[in-house]
Image (cartoon, helix red, strand yellow):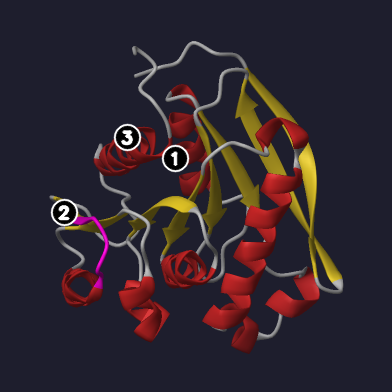
Amino acid sequence: MPSGSPISRRDAAIPAGTVSLPGSLARPAEVRGVVAFAHGSGSSRHSPRNQYVASVLGQAGLGTLLFDLLTEAEAADRRNVFDIPLLSRRLIAAVRWLRSVPELSETPVGLFGASTGAGAALMAAAEEPGIGAVVSRGGRPDLAGDHLGRVRAPTLLIVGGDDAPVLALNEEALLKLRCEKRLAVVEGATHLFEEPGTLEEAARLGAEWFARHLGPRADT
């Protein structure tokens, strides 16, 4: 799966209404798609799990945008952390920013959500045209509510086999999705995928999903 393409990195400033959100954009020289990440509550663009997943996506020829969905002042108010419509709007702002980057203007865009960020990713996919694919890791897709039935992007829900409450929520959400969809259960994993090999498996599944739906295979 590795593309062998060198990866360039740059800081980003995402305009979102009256605020600017810091981020980091990584892009292989030969990019098949770019993925914007929505982290979970209490996390940030520095999330080691999302950074690891982003590195795996980069090896698969995918660009990645890790950014903070809230400013430091906003994140201090816990109501904002769980304001899924607000987080969704911020994610849409990031997608539009990506499309404004000249070298990425024609590149397919995907969304990767973790925990509460998955609800925001699915809500954004329902609202913003042209999203190529969505992946949720240990996510709360139920937080997208009625937007689930409006998602058209192919959606992969990755859940730990030992994360019983979240697994049940994902099974229910899967029934409400009307797009191409799949529920992948990583056996032995709990909510944070801290068990040996489980995060690696989740990253592999996500990379394969995005590579399939965001662009041609590197070997074609």
The type of residue carrying mark 3 is: Arg
Question: What residue did someone put label 3 on?
Answer: 212
Relative to 112, 139 lies left or right: left
Residue appearing at x 62%, y 59% in the figure: 44
Residue appearing at x 16%, y 62% in the figure: 162
The type of residue carrying mark 1 is: Val
Secondary structure of residue under mark 3 = helix
Along the viewing direction, whichever of 65 and 214 lies nearer the viewer: 214
Question: What residue did someone put label 2 on?
Answer: 185
Question: Which of the two discs, 2 and 3, sits closer to the camera?
Answer: 3
Secondary structure of residue under mark 2 = strand
Q: Position of residue 96 (x, y in %)?
A: 68, 55
Crowd around label 1: few <14 · some 14–19 · many ≥20 (10 Å): many
Identify the image quadrant of the C terminus.
top left
Q: Position of residue 211 (x, y in %)?
A: 37, 33
Question: What residue did someone put label 1 on?
Answer: 53
Q: Which residues make up the magenta segment?
A: 177-182
